[in-house]
Amino acid sequence: MAASKLTLLITILSLFFTVLSPVSQAESPLELRKIKQQQKAQSQDTQPFVGVNIGTDVSSGVSPSALVSFLQVQKITHIRIYDADPDLLKALARTKIRVIISVPNNQLLAIGSSNTTAAAWIGKNVVAFYPDTLITAIAVGDEVLTTVPSSAPLLLPAIEGLYSALVAANLHTQIKISTPHAAAIVLDPFPPSQAFFNQSLSFVVLPLLQFLSRTGSPLMMNLYPYYVFMQNKGVVPLDNSLFKPLTPSKEMVDPNTLLHYTNVLDAMIDAAYFSMKNLNVTDVSVLVTESGWPSKGDSKEPYATIDNADTYNSNLIKHVLDRSGTPLRPEITSSVYIYELFNEDLRSPPVSEANWGLFYGNSTPVYLLHVSASGTFLANDTTNQTYCVVMDEVDSKTLQAALDWACGPGRANCSEIQPGENCYQPNNVKSHASYAFDSYYQKEGKAAGSCDFKGVAMITTTDPSHGSCIYPGSKMITNKTRQVMNATETSGAADSLRFITFCSYRISAINKGLHVLVVVGFNSLLFIPFMAPW
């Protein structure tokens, strides 16, 4: 009893002196607010996410403030830029958007040669903005080892100098430092278990990996299944590169590990993990700083199409948000930054160079991603609109029964698919059923289970309207779409459509060239059907 009273007395005295003691600088209201912001930022960055890269070679763009508003409309919460534009960093303040800033390749010499210059860079581009602006990482250079190998000896000194400056600012636990690499630094990448880093680069790669391990920073990789497919046509099936489902017999099995690979990207990520393991580094995660698919190409790029770009990026988003990891590391799902937000129309040929974006420079979408069932990341679906349509390869008997139910007991408005009406053509059960399904889905307020029809329907963000046939969902959002786009464009015009000044960046098929033999598949669908109540 006496002991408990003594403990109580000590507790009271401790609280008493805590109250009377002066507030230290670290516990000032400003510092406490910063600490809380940092903790919140860190806790929200632990789950895998999909971000976007923002390039520079755009003839007409939006101002930093308009861009931030646009990102918020699109529910994009993670971006990567190719320098540390102060106007954009200021515009991002007090938003929930997290940003990777970059040291351009042409600044490596100065920063890698002087710790004073490195400290000044951190002070100007990080300390001045954080934590109001949520800077999550610094990308030091971009594909330095393969694009500017003469700067390779400066890479690690630059990284170390910047890290020391972060330590001095007490920001080294909140902001990570790494450098993005081209996939070409990994040799013999399939099967992944036999992959290894280019040994001529080991004088940089090994100490870099040791730094990343010591500081808890990721290995940043720019990974493009598009280039794998283009350089290995006839060996790498298109469906494998696009995350499309294949039969198990067509999946590629690593003969050394017996792991099944169902898509090219997972194989590329695991090749990086195996390469690190060969250097006795097993505690560094992979962050995919670039991945994407071009929507347009020249005559030598027939697979750079809107359909393929839509399929790749839609399935990529779903794959990340499914949090299924890779065959080697199922417990770790790599976050991915899609290349890129805007088409960069000022790029030099080939045509695909200017057509990697989800949007044109004026903020209108190049295509609508099929991501309606993949969490909150809606990318370029500015209306957040979904439709209900027929799935592919459904037998006509089952489909006719579902159509009869929708237009009968389901009370869908099927007047537009009657003879002579706008949606009668094409006169087939699939077309008529899609219209009826969407009518029912919209009538039910897009409620869960209202787009299934015994497994023959699916949800999509692509407007199925055609010609004079306007689907019910499209009729409902025409005005909303116009308002969203006009608001974005007006905001940009008010700021003279001055685009953000970033460091110029160019994707080169040569620089990102891969010598890969991969045959893989994927076992998930593009659209997610829901269960119907009927």
Image (cartoon, grey):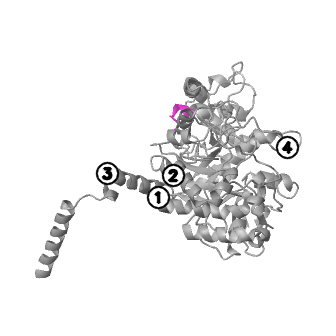
Which of label 4 and label 3 is nearer to you?
3
Earlier residue among tags 3 and 1: 3
Which of label 4 and label 2 is nearer to you?
2
Corner quadrant of residue 271:
bottom right
Which residue is at 82% across, 62% downward?
A: 516
Q: Give the distance between the C-alpha atoms of the residues marked 1 and 2, in whole angstroms.
A: 8 Å
Which residue is at 65% across, 23% downward?
A: 416
What residue does disc 2 label? 123
Which residue is at 54% across, 48% downward?
A: 125
What residue does disc 4 label? 301
What residue does disc 3 label? 29
Which residue is at 85% across, 43% downward?
A: 301
Asked if labels 2 and 1 touch by Cβ distance under 8 angstroms, the answer is yes
Earlier residue among tags 4 and 3: 3
Earlier residue among tags 4 and 2: 2
What residue does disc 1 label? 169
Helix, strand, or loop for circle 3?
helix
Q: Amino acid at mark 4?
A: Glu
Q: Position of residue 455 (x, y in %)?
A: 63, 46
Helix, strand, or loop for circle 4?
loop
Crowd tier of the residue under label 2, counting other residues whose Cα lies within 10 Å: few below 14, some 14–19, many 20 or above: some
The quarter in which the C terminus is drawn is top right
